[in-house]
Amino acid sequence: MTQGTAPSGNTAPSGNTAPSGNTAPSGTRIAVASFIGTAIEFYDFYIYGTAAALVFGAVFFPSFSPLAGTLLSLGTFAVGFVARPLGAILFGHFGDRIGRKRMLIVSLVTMGGATVAVGLVPSYDTIGVLAPILLVTARFLQGIGLGGEWGGAVLLATEYAPPGRRGLYSAFPQLGPAVGFLLGNALFLLLAATMSDETFRSVGWRIPFLASAVLLVVGYYIRMRIAETPVFQAAMDRQERARVPFVDLLRSQPLVLVLATLSFILSHTLFYTVTTFALSYGTGTLGLDRTTMLGAAMVAVAVMGAATLWFAVRSDRVGRKKLCLASAVCAAVWAFPLFWLIDSGSPVLIALGMTGGLLCFAMLYGPMGAFLPELFRVRYRYSGASFAYSASGIVGGGISPLVATDLFARTGSSAAVSAYVVVIAVICFVSLLPLGETKDADFTDGLRAKPAS
């Protein structure tokens, strides 16, 4: 088959044949398989963030003050981000040694099972201190599963992509966060509209977690029907298999790994500042209606989903690095207007503020779906992309909501939170500068994107 032809029928892209004994999937099946897992995984992850901001303080930490309860519930949210790098190393190791497909299935089951378990954990009033312990355990397993999910999903998409279209193909799994967030929060909005606060706090919040079981079955079925990626299979045929991929990664590309990790912190910081901290800030501090805040967030995330696709495709033309640098600049500029608009209390202005913040996120997140895998060689690509993504989430996603809450508590002003976002944006910009452009690299040979001299 000629290189550059999109996958269809029984052909495989990028000049590689399908793995022996399998039929290469169509472009549509690749899109669905890479998208469905991230949509489910992020649905699972985000409903936890929403529940942590809205009800976990009262359900699992009722003996503390409202502020302390919120901090503790957001602390359990952070546990998932701490676990993600461990999941990245674990799933990356086996994903680089035995294949992408198997690890994608295991990560899906791990994450989905832990999510259902969260919905079954009794409250503090029922079993006492054991309740938050069980909650943290389930959250930790959630993080382990997601640590292997994102990297495997973007590799499934990009390693099937024809040359010059990796940005487009990487957009499929990158749409998962938007769809997962919308599904989860639509369900929370429905429950909030049909239940009293007392019923929602006792039973209603559990429904989105238990409903994850249905999505898990669908995702498992779809992923079982996908063959191994041709790029990985070709590497295995050439006996290019690292004995310990993560160690090989640390020996060969340590600086690239550090820079990639630092550059992606901003993505998590933007998303969770807008969708987790702002939700808690709006409902708790400003006294705004929960439905208003969730509705504004859903509008912003819907726009974000479309923008993620556009920026991912655009990166195939203008390059990944340029868009990521522009995102850092835009985030620094928007950090203060974001909270000025939320402070107005106007639903329209709140939605505008959140939309601006998530457009900055999309400008970085869209290109990163191809950029991170392109930075690493085939034999440890799963480990490199997964670890950079997951480790950046510890600061950007796990710690940022806690820092934002603490900064506001200490200063009484959202300006401190905005300043924090500016600092993260500067770190992102500086980290991106030494990295080379990757969009035209020969992906099958494992691009080694080195810092510019």
Image: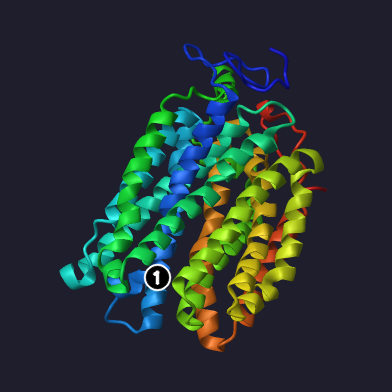
Q: Is residue 324 visible?
A: yes
Report crowding for label 1: few under 14, some 14 to 19, many 20 or more residues within 10 A (C-alpha).
many
The chosen color scheme is: rainbow
Vertical arrangement, residue 59 with respect to residue 88, above or below: below
Residue corresponding to mark 1: 54
Say whether residue 317 is left or right of residue 52: right
Q: Which residue reaches farthest front?
A: 194
Amino acid under label 1? Leu
Q: Nearer the viewer, residue 149 or 39?
A: 39
Which quarter of the image is occupied by the N terminus?
top right
Expressed as whole percent of the image width and height from the top left, the position of residue 197 reads: 32, 73
Vertical arrangement, residue 222 with respect to residue 2, above or below: below
Q: Nearer the viewer, residue 238 or 71?
A: 71
**Rendered residue at 16%/69% (across/down):** 126
Expressed as whole percent of the image width and height from the top left, the position of residue 320 reads: 74, 45
**Rendered residue at 66%/56% (across/down):** 263
Q: Nearer the viewer, residue 124 or 433?
A: 124
Secondary element type, mark 1: helix
Q: Is residue 275 visible?
A: no
**Rendered residue at 35%/47% (across/down):** 212
Say whether residue 346 is left or right of residue 49: right
- Please count the marks in the image: 1
Expressed as whole percent of the image width and height from the top left, the position of residue 203 reads: 26, 63
Expressed as whole percent of the image width and height from the top left, the position of residue 139 reads: 36, 57
Q: Which residue reaches farthest left?
A: 126
Vertical arrangement, residue 189 with respect to residue 30, above or below: below
